[in-house]
Image (tube, helix red, strand yellow):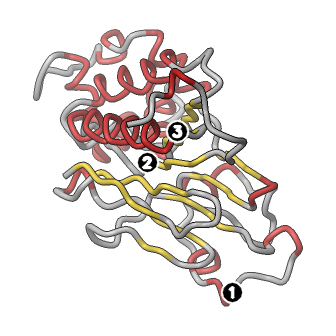
Amino acid sequence: MPDPDKGWTGMAAHIYFAIGDIHGESAKLAALHDTILDRIAFENAPARIVHLGDYVDRGPDTRDVIERVMALESRFRDDDRVEVISLMGNHEQMMLNAYDGESEADSWWKQGGAEAADSYAGGRGRAGESWRNTIPNAHIAWLRTLAPIYLDAPRALAFVHAGIDPATFPDCDTAIRLWTRSSKFFEHAMWPNRPELRDLLVVHGHTPRNFLPEVYPHRINVDTGACFGGPLTAVMLKEGQPPQFLRAP
């Protein structure tokens, strides 16, 4: 296996690894991170690991998921070989809104927030009215830093949690980026003829159809229902090659 510590060969373009909705599935994330890092070492080329959001809620260990993502960011912060990009999902926004009192906590609680709060309180059913006090300030601060989209304009790639508004891209409203399930995004025939959309590939999650990724010329959906019994999936995008998929069952 090539040793990345000996430098990259040639001037290869970045290989992307975009990870779908995690939702508290820490064991699957740990396994997928290991698989991705092994593949990066094998490819011996610079890489970008993109987390597409929805780290929190539903699954058993929101706290450890955030710890793992933050640790990966820290590991490669000063490394020009691997860049780690973490995006906001709608569940992070719901969690922050509940934490800040901008919306009723009950709404977030019913959407998987109860499981997230329990992971901080120390176990199932242990979160109570003081749940905010159990969440480390560093986790809340990190959630506030998450961007809603990452663009690689030269390669016509957009990474986003839910999707885009084809009529206004790249200036879509943040709510669209976090929440959309509009046919205007999903159906390529409905996209307007705009230069901003020419050859664009959107990589997203948010909408699990089944336990397999969706692959179309204009979008790839890598939410494969990890918190519903499906695998945690990442798409590997290597310039000039079709997408490949890595999974942690």
Q: Are marks 2 and 3 in contact (CB under 8 Å)?
A: no
**Residue at the location (51% across, 33% down)?**
97
Type of the residue with mark 3: Asn
Judging by the rendered image, the residue that carries numbered circle 1 is: 190
| Front residue of 111 and 75 | 75
| Residue that lies at the very extreme toward the bottom in this rendered image | 189
Q: Pick the quarter of the image with the N terminus.
A: top left
Pointers 1 and 3 in contact (C-beta within 8 Å): no
Name the image quarter holding residue 34: top left
Location of mark 3 (residue): 44
Residue 136, above or below 103? above
Q: Mark 2 or mark 1: which comes first in sequence?
A: 2
Please state which of residues 156 and 40 is positioned toward the viewer in this rendering. Answer: 40
Q: Is residue 109 visible?
A: no
Q: CA distance from mark 1 to mark 3?
A: 39 Å
What's the residue type where badge 2 is placed?
Ile
How far, Cα to Cα, is label 2 from label 3? 20 Å
Residue density around tag 2, few if under 14, some if 14–19, many if 20 or more, within 10 Å: many
Q: Is residue 51 above or below residue 224?
A: above
Rendered location of residue 12, percent (x, y):
67, 46
Element under label 2? strand
Separation of marks 2 and 1 at Cα, in angstroms:
27 Å
**Label 2 or label 3, whichever comes before in sequence order:** 2
Disc number lying in front (1 or 3): 3
Q: Residues within 10 Å of mark 3 (few under 14, many from 20)?
A: many
Disc 2: which residue: 19
Give me the residue at 36% from left, 20% from top. 67
The residue lying at 63 percent from left, 75 percent from top is 218
Earlier sequence position, callout 1 versus callout 3: 3
